[in-house]
Image: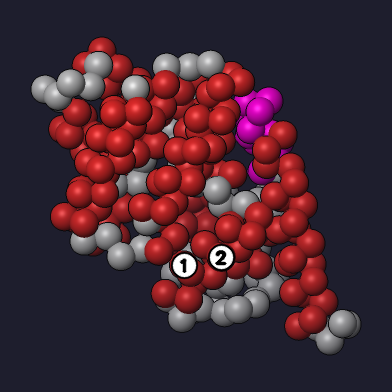
């Protein structure tokens, strides 16, 4: 089982290098952290472990193609995962499960995970976007685009905001991690799809919420 885990991560790493991935927020370290989170959730919730590990390993491999050519990296990655796994020693009957989990993992995708394996990938991926690591990842992304350290939510936005609208906002020069947190993270703990995921997410969310409250107060000169 550990050999399969190592092989999946190595294959993902090779694929990301071949694709030209340079995204520090969705790099190999993110895969390793998400893998550990998914395994911890699976130990409590069940699910097919090889399928979960493969879905984690390949869930972001479509990022570069999305950035270059458009489309949705979740759908792109699902197709790439099938290409990588077909004809290998990976359990072939689990490939459709892996693909569906990848298709369903995106926070702004508007999709509900259809399997336990997909729910575990979804929760693990979102948990790695919370807490101190989540803050660092958000600033890594906005720093790449020379965006703001802080900017308030635009006055013309009425919440709740369609997640697809957030995708468009993410390239605006006035975008900021604070906006991302306010628009997408407000009910993220409740949106975890497993009991274990909710428990793991709760403390990280509280830390992140406190950070952005403090950031706003400092910017406004209240601290």
Indicate whether 150 appears above or below 131: below
Type of secondary structure dominating the magenta stretch? helix
Q: Give the magenta-colored segment's residue range.
A: 188-198
Residue 74 visible: no
Distance, label 2 to label 1, CA atoms, is 9 Å
- The residue under the point 30% across, 17% down is 94
Indicate whether 23 appears above or below 101: below
> Are circles 2 and 1 on residues that touch, CB within 8 Å?
no
Location of the C terminus (image quadrant): bottom right
- The residue under the point 70% across, 50% down is 204
Q: Position of residue 70 (x, y in %)?
A: 27, 55
| Residue that label 1 marks | 141
Q: Is residue 213 left or right of residue 58?
A: right
Q: Position of residue 106 (x, y in %)?
A: 46, 42
User: Does the segment drawn in magenta span residue 203?
Assistant: no
Q: Secondary structure at mark 1?
A: helix
Q: Is residue 169 left or right of residue 185?
A: left
The residue furthest left is 87
- The residue under the point 14% across, 24% down is 88
The residue furthest top is 93
Based on the displayed image, in which of its 4 quarters is residue 25 positioned?
Answer: bottom left
| Residue that label 2 marks | 136
Indicate whether 59 appears above or below 24: above
Indicate whether 43 appears above or below 129: above
Sooner in the amino-acid sequence: mark 2 or mark 1:
2
Instruction: Categorize mark 2 by other alpha carbons within 10 Å: few (<14), some (14-19), many (20+).
Output: some
Location of the N terminus (image quadrant): top left
Q: Position of residue 145 (x, y in %)?
A: 42, 76
């Amino acid at each position: 089982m550990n050999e399969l885990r190592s092989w999946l991560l190595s294959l993902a790493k090779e694929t990301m290098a071949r694709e030209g991935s340079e995204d520090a927020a969705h790099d190999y370290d993110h895969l390793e952290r998400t893998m550990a989170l998914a395994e911890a959730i699976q130990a409590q919730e069940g699910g097919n472990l090889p399928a979960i590990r493969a879905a984690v390993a390949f869930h972001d491999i479509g990022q570069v193609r999305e950035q270059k050519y458009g489309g949705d990296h979740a759908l792109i990655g699902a197709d790439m995962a099938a290409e990588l796994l077909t004809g290998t020693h990976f359990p072939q009957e689990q490939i459709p499960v892996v693909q569906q989990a990848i298709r369903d993992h995106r926070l702004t995708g508007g999709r509900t995970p259809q399997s336990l394996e997909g729910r575990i990938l979804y929760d693990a991926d979102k948990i790695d976007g919370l807490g101190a690591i989540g803050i660092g990842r958000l600033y890594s992304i906005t720093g790449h685009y020379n965006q703001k350290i802080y900017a308030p939510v635009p006055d013309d936005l009425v919440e709740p905001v369609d997640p697809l609208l957030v995708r468009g906002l993410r390239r605006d020069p006035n975008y900021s991690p604070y906006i991302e947190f306010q628009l997408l993270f407000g009910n993220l703990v409740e949106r975890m799809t497993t009991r274990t995921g909710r428990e793991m997410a709760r403390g990280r969310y509280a830390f992140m919420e406190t950070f952005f409250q403090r950031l706003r107060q400092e910017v406004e000169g209240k601290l």
